[in-house]
Amino acid sequence: MDGIIIINKPKEYTSHDVVAKVKKICKEKVGHTGTLDPMATGVLPLLIGEGTKLSEYITNHDKIYIATIKLGIKTDTLDSEGKIIEKQEVDFKKISTENVNKVLKTFLGKQKQTPPMYSAIKIKGKKLYQYAREGKKVEVPEREIEIYEIELLKIENDEILFKVHCSKGTYIRSLCEDVAIKLGTIGYMKELERVKVGEYEINQAVTLKEIEENGQSIKKNQNIGNEQNLESNANIEFLKKHIITIQEFFSKYTTICLEENKLKLFLNGVNLSTNKPDGTYQIQIKNGKWLGVGVVKNKLLKRKIICKNNISVVK
């Protein structure tokens, strides 16, 4: 099983927890393309098998989030999991729809953002949250981000719900704090849902509960002795129905068709001469069978991703 599965991560699960659970089911290499905090939910693309080689193609994707800011309270982690370190009265005259919209629009475009101390960014080989837990102060360098769109969804008492389309590397916790400051108060990120990563949306995602319940329902409807294997196989079949294959991922890329005399050389890692411009290509063989992906650089074609089951097709 090689490709991408889109998981709707539940609350209180780390991204690593989700990876471990799916890895146990499919017994393949599994990785993810961007950590979601335990308190956050939503789109978490998992790379399975040879699909782990797709990481470089999707880690730079922009993202869309729906977030809730709780005003009047500041936490040390800038989210609901942290310790309250400050409280402040909220001036509700400044929390009008007109004013909140005006403030949100000031964040559009490219800008510098300071990541939160409770993050996995490394400074001198050590993660920021490790410094924070030790009570040590460290200078956190700003990073350039971009906000493409930002939209107010709702204001309810001291909470603001908004939607934001942003570049890779944007910390929504920091954005929530910055919005609160511009509104003349303090605040933290109370809720966060990632609804889109690149072209992958929340309506494409499956939940861990759906995967587990699928196996259990199959097991209940079958009178077979080895229930554990039956449930595991049912879960694998469920994943296969929802996986985005490597071929589907590269379906819009130009195709190179290899002659039989060049096929073995290509599979053995030999660079082949070509007149194609630099770039990534789908690789097919003469009978139309899809083989994998290659990269052309300086008039040389090199193998990039070859799925194991596809190699057996050409032997």
Image (spheres, rainbow, N blue to C red):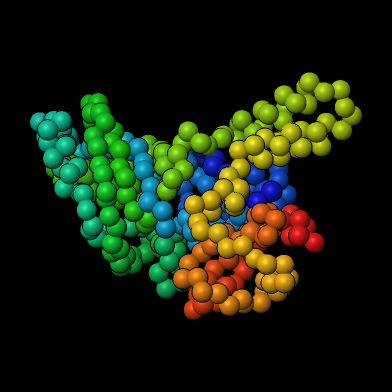
Vertical relation: 145 (above or below) 302:
above
Q: Residue 90: percent from the left, percent from the top?
A: 17, 34
Q: Residue at x 24, y 60 (%)?
A: 112
Report the number of discs. 0
Q: Which of 302 and 92 is in front in this view?
A: 302
Q: Residue 214: percent from the left, percent from the top?
A: 68, 29
Vertical relation: 175 (above or below) 214:
below
Q: Which of 206 and 135 is in front in this view?
A: 206
Tell me if residue 4 can be seen.
Answer: no
Q: Which residue is drawn at 20% across and 49% down?
A: 107
Residue 203 falls left or right of residue 264 = left
Residue 66 falls left or right of residue 181 = right
Q: Residue 78: percent from the left, percent from the top?
A: 33, 47
Q: Quadrant of residue 132?
A: bottom left
- Position of the C terminus by quadrant: bottom right
Name the outermost residue toward the top: 221
Q: In which quarter of the image is residue 93?
A: top left
Q: Which residue is drawn at 25% across and 28% down?
A: 154
Q: Which residue is drawn at 68% across and 60% down?
A: 286
Name the outermost residue toward the right: 225
Q: Residue 39: percent from the left, percent from the top?
A: 45, 40
Vertical relation: 56 (above or below) 10:
below
Tell me if residue 154 can be seen.
Answer: yes
Name the outermost residue toward the left: 93
